[in-house]
Image (tube, grey):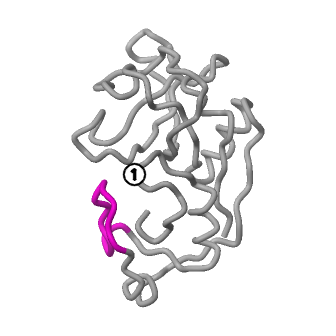
Amino acid sequence: MDCVTDAGGCNGGNYGPAFSYAEKNKLVLETELPYTAKDGTCNTAAMAATGLVQLSGYESVTSKSITQFKAALDKQPVGIAIEASGTSFQQYKRGILSKNCGQSLDHAVTAVGYGSNRKDGSGKDYVLVRNSWGKTWGLKGYIKIALNDKDICGMMIQPFYPTV
């Protein structure tokens, strides 16, 4: 976030410029440069010295295709844009967010997996999403968003994933 000044940083984020940056520069593990949930200064020396992987590009996932979305998540995290301006998203604490928060995309986050709450009888499928607001928000920085044809928060409008 600190090294890609045109990606929006703490003002919603934009993963396009971030992916482009990662095509030109090696990335480091979070243990090397911990995420702080606030704008800071790019540590180019650490990036150059300890960088592990460099992207070759990124691919889009077919918009609103649950099957393709899950197939992409089976391989790697997927960058998604969502509408996060509503209270249902901002005040999320637990469970599966199934209230539609809108389709006006204003926040970049990362889908890291998917699952189902079939054990509790609800039968709801969900996507596990890592947010950038720190560990005090949601489920220690994560949210479970319902995975269904309603496309909650617009998460399946513009999904992308990195290629190496």
- Tell me if residue 29 comes above or below residue 122 in the rendering: below
Which residue shows up at 44% across the image and 29% down it? Answer: 85
Q: Position of residue 146 (x, y in %)?
A: 51, 22
- Tell me if residue 149 comes above or below residue 129 in the rendering: above
Q: Nearer the viewer, residue 15 or 123?
A: 15
Q: Position of residue 155 (x, y in %)?
A: 59, 33
Which residue shows up at 34% across the image and 73% down it? Answer: 41
The residue pinned by badge 1 equals 10
Is 36 part of what is drawn in magenta? Answer: yes
Q: Nearer the viewer, residue 155 or 7?
A: 7
Furthest-top residue in this view: 121
Furthest-right residue in this view: 62
Quadrant where the N terminus is found in the figure: bottom left
Please provide the residue range marked out in magenta.
Answer: 30-41
Which residue shows up at 72% across the image and 30% down it? Answer: 64
Where, by quadrant of the figure, is residue 22 drawn?
Answer: bottom right
